[in-house]
Image (tube, rainbow, N blue to C red):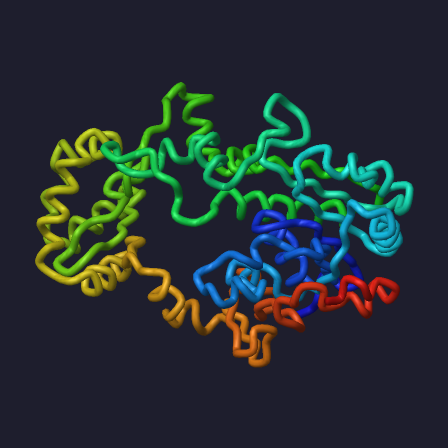
Amino acid sequence: MSALLSGYRVLDLTNVLAGPFCCHQLAHMGAEVIKVERPQGGDLARQLGADPELNRDFMGVSFLAQNAGKRSITLDLKQPDDRRRFLELVKEVDVVVENFRPGVMQRLGLGYDTLCEANPKLVYCAISGFGQDGPLANYPAYDQIIQGMAGVMSITGAPDNAPYRVGYPLADTVGGLTAAMTINAALAERPRRTHFIDISMLESVLATMGWAVSNLLVAGKEPRPLGNDNVTASPSGTFRTGDGLINIAANKQEQFEAVCQVLGHPEWIADPRFAERQARLEHRSELTRCIETALANDTTEHWWRALVEAGVPAGPVYSVAEALAHPQVRDRGLIERFEHSTIGRPLEVVSGGYRIDGRAPRVANPPPRLGADNHELLPAHAANDE
């Protein structure tokens, strides 16, 4: 795949997930990403993950997941000599990404204005929980805090068990994607100028909640948890079959009618409880009972194939392991494999999640050990190589 960001250099000062995921995307697009880490331990993600031995070795699974293709140097930005070295690097890069609390870089003497004096075409991206200003700007924020405050948890789960947190770090990931998208837009500007990109994880998540937010803003309807049901259509959700679960998304009238035919109940089409979209929403529970009674007569695999052949979007409910093993995922190159990795054994991680010109993105090297590139990138900084 062509390296679309080849020739661009990024200083990645970020920790844990939102910032590292942003720079993970930039690296897979071809940018040279230099991770700037504390000499004592580096990115906290190096100590996080399900393998305790890797955590002790500062190569935790959480770090491995988001840092392939990057280089690592160690600098203590509280020390004058290392701040000077950092400013020398800034002169030679295109992007700086950080996810400190607002004001930290300024207090270090490395704020936006200072860095732009060193590099008048610098794209500076600051990722934080709430943005660089406002009453909560200096509050700490992790993914779960943002999910709760954005309203995500309030509409996740069923009416009898909500609020629920989404089962992976949604807010961190959305914040990282938003940052990567905005950085790319800034780099595409001609002629290029310096920009300060202010990414609020809270706002990034709210921006992805368009339907839920707009139903409140425009229609005055408060979003509420519906479990696996679709707020706009019925039958659209998860249903029990003879051996498990199936997702059915019959969002159009003709799709509902096809469901009725496949399940052997064409009489539902004219039933006044189900005949029209609004009626089906008002009688969702009754329709679900009818559908699950029919689905109980066969397996998820049977009904999946039958519904898809009839033009109805449907699919099984997989575990993560089942999803990764499916040929649709397995054969498209999503998983990136390093036969010789920095953890002493082959390593598999998720790449960019897209294809360009028919090929999945790849990076040249596995996630780096802490300070692995000090000798090359900081030749006068051998003291931090250990």
Residue that extends furthest to the bottom in the rendered view of this protein: 339
Q: Is residue 177 above or below residue 330?
A: above
Total labels: the figure holds 0
* Residue occupying the point 20% across, 49% down: 239
Q: In this orientation, which residue lies closer to the viewer: 181 or 320?
A: 320
Q: In this orientation, which residue lies closer to the viewer: 263 or 111?
A: 111
Q: Do we see residue 265 in this rendering? A: yes
* Residue occupying the point 28% across, 39% down: 227
Tell whether 175 sits left or right of 292. Answer: right
* Residue occupying the point 72% across, 64% down: 371
Q: Is residue 375 above or below residue 263?
A: below
- Residue 187 position, x and y percent, is 77, 49
Tell whether 206 sits left or right of 245. Answer: right
**Quarter of the view holding residue 364:** bottom right
Q: Do we see residue 190 in this rendering? A: no
- Residue 298 position, x and y percent, is 12, 61
* Residue occupying the point 62% across, 37% down: 128
- Residue 116 position, x and y percent, is 86, 41
Q: In this orientation, which residue lies closer to the viewer: 189 or 279?
A: 189
Tell whether 85 sits left or right of 247. Answer: right
**Quarter of the view holding residue 385:** bottom right
Tell whether 376 sits left or right of 279. Answer: right
- Residue 308 position, x and y percent, is 28, 59
| The C terminus - image quarter | bottom right
Q: Is residue 53 above or below residue 212?
A: below
Q: Is residue 201 above or below residue 169?
A: above
| The N terminus - image quarter | bottom right
